[in-house]
Amino acid sequence: MSEVTYYFLGFAGIYVLMGWALYLPYRVGQLNFLIVACMAITAYFGGFAAREWGWPFIVILIIGILFGATIAFIFSLAIGDAPCFTVVIVGLTSVFIVKTVIENWRTLGGTIGFFHIPGPNNMLAIIYSLLFLVGLLVFRIDHSRWGRAASVVFIDRDVAVTLGVDIKKLGMFFQIISCSIAGMAGILDAFLVKSLSPEFFTFSMIGYLMCILFVGGYTTMWGVILSAFFLQGIPLMFPSNIASWRLVIYGALLVIIILLRPEGLITRKMLWSIKIKSPRYITN
Amino acid sequence: MEIFIAQLISGLALGSIYVLLVTGFNLMLLVAKIIQFAYPQIVVVSMYTCWWVLKLTGNKLIIILAGVSVSIILSLLSEPIFRKISSIEGVDINASFIASMGIAMIMMDIMSHSINYGFPVAFSPDWVGGNIFGYGLITVSKGQLFALLGGIIAVLIFFFLLYHTNQGRFFRAIAENRFAACLVGIPIIKTSIFSYLIVGILGGFSAILFSMLIGSASPWLGEFVALKMLAVSIVAGLGNLQGGLVCGLLLGIIEAMAIGYFSGSWSNVIAFAVMLIVVLMKPGGLFGIKI
């Protein structure tokens, strides 16, 4: 396999994970950018633990997932049932705080970056095995009591409360799962690239993740898969002078999709029409 | 004590620009019912325009006119996009945030590719100006004075417009209840377009004052300012104009104090951390949400 294909598949897999991490809390109407901060923290932790302490990959992966879950649990105590934009600002400020701390922490390489991370060679197999497991988890959540409750919260919070849905507990649950997935993605990213830079975790990445979720479709888990592969492939599809404008392409895609197809490319109605039952398509 | 006073002056100057930005942002939220995350990027594009015109002509009046015009044009250009989004059935205010994020990404990438090879631009000392007052460590620069006075005057004019004119009454009526405002014959679309015009003017002045205060601009400035603007708005309470005034000034002072007492690179972290703590403790904002 060529290096280009290897990294394309690797990154696409990681971004599918991050897309699902953004998709889950959006089921209750929360845009949780804390996932990017969690990804940065666990990526640097994973890289440092592997290079400096020689910890095995599996231990680092488990701790990374737990790290993500713990961070989310602490934050969700305050913002479990917060409005969308409060969650947005908590996520955005966290990303910039984490980025600045990393840039000023010499042990982590500062602005130069952190290099030579040792790790397993079969990363693609690991990424796609985990992707399959997380996909099953997201599918199960979507089709569970929690998933149905989330659908109601998304449509009308007041109705959800009347029906006895504990919005705070539900929000906490989705935030914890989402940050755990982001923690996992951070570890996988560190071991795939074998180097890290704080410049990776910026506004551009948040915009990219938004693009993955909203272009693919935020009402089902399948849209993320389509758009992660498509958007990751854009730099490969176009000549380098056009591909370097990829932020313009992603931004334009976001605007066009919101204008023409607000639910994204893959919608619940589309799945219903091809007989794939989607939990969010509510009928009487 | 001298450091404290010097940083207080600096903070008030910076804070008054944040107040202008947050006021424009809240006006969009209240009247047009959108989250205009790309607004700071419009301000940065106006700053770049000022820098370009400064290089070409050096005439201050032309620079001011160019900066404000570009901001108005960009603000008005975004109006049809947001109006179309608002008219789509089933979409909420989140859609405008997502679209404005897309617009912000486009503007940021164009600036980082096309202007000055992506490198930050510096305004000439003639534009920024030197100190006009000095006593020990306490100094007041021309940029600080203009930012402070300009900010106060712009906000006063804005509030006069809001509370003492028919147009302001229309704004407040639409903010209170769009449907009822429509029933009593208030022209919703015309008023909404007028709000974009006002926001464009505020953005243009913010750009001019910002360029005089900090003396430079970069493509990444917009994302920092956008984050601060959104954070101030949420800390104050979304759509709360009076709350935005207090919190905008407070953010400027906190940031200036952090710069004065800690290393420069940590100042943003401290400002963000303070806002993060406030948001975590009071997710609904300090002064209450008004939408």
Image (cartoon, coloured by chain):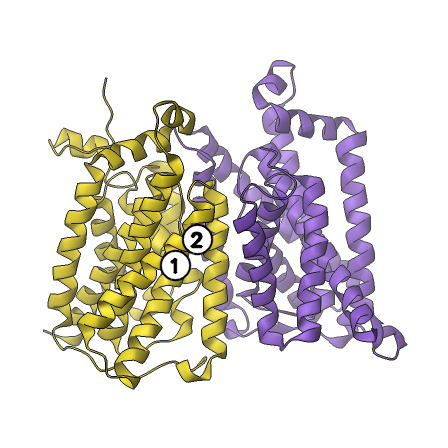
The image quarter containing residue B161 is top right
**Colour yellow belongs to chain:** A
Judged from the image, the secondary structure of the residue bearing numbered disc 2 is: helix
Q: Amino acid at mark 2?
A: Phe
Residue placed most toward the observer, A12 or A34: A34
Q: Which residue is mark 2?
A: A75
Q: Which residue is mark 1?
A: A71
Around disc 1, counting alpha carbons within 10 Å, would you say few (fewer than 14), some (14 to 19), or many (20 or more)?
many
**Residue A15 picture location, percent across and down:** 26, 59
The image quarter containing residue A240 is bottom left
Q: Is residue A238 above or below residue A157?
A: below
Rendered-image quadrant of the N terminus of chain B: bottom right
Q: Amino acid at mark 1?
A: Ile
- Do the residues bearing badges 2 and 1 touch, measured as CB atoms within 8 Å? yes
Report the Cα–Cα distance between label 2 and label 1. 6 Å
**Residue B140 picture location, percent across and down:** 84, 70
**Colour purple belongs to chain:** B
**Residue B53 picture location, percent across and down:** 68, 65
The image quarter containing residue B131 is bottom right
Q: Is residue A249 visible?
A: no
Q: Is residue A200 visible?
A: yes
Around disc 2, counting alpha carbons within 10 Å, would you say few (fewer than 14), some (14 to 19), or many (20 or more)?
some
Q: Is residue A102 above or below residue B202?
A: below
Outermost residue, top side: B183
The residue drawn where x is 45% and y is 61% is A203
Name the subunit of mark 2.
A
**Residue B96 picture location, percent across and down:** 47, 40
Judged from the image, the secondary structure of the residue bearing numbered disc 1 is: helix
Left of A63 or right of it: where is B19? right
Left of A112 or right of it: where is A176? left
Name the subunit of mark 1.
A
Q: Is residue B60 above or below residue B69?
A: below
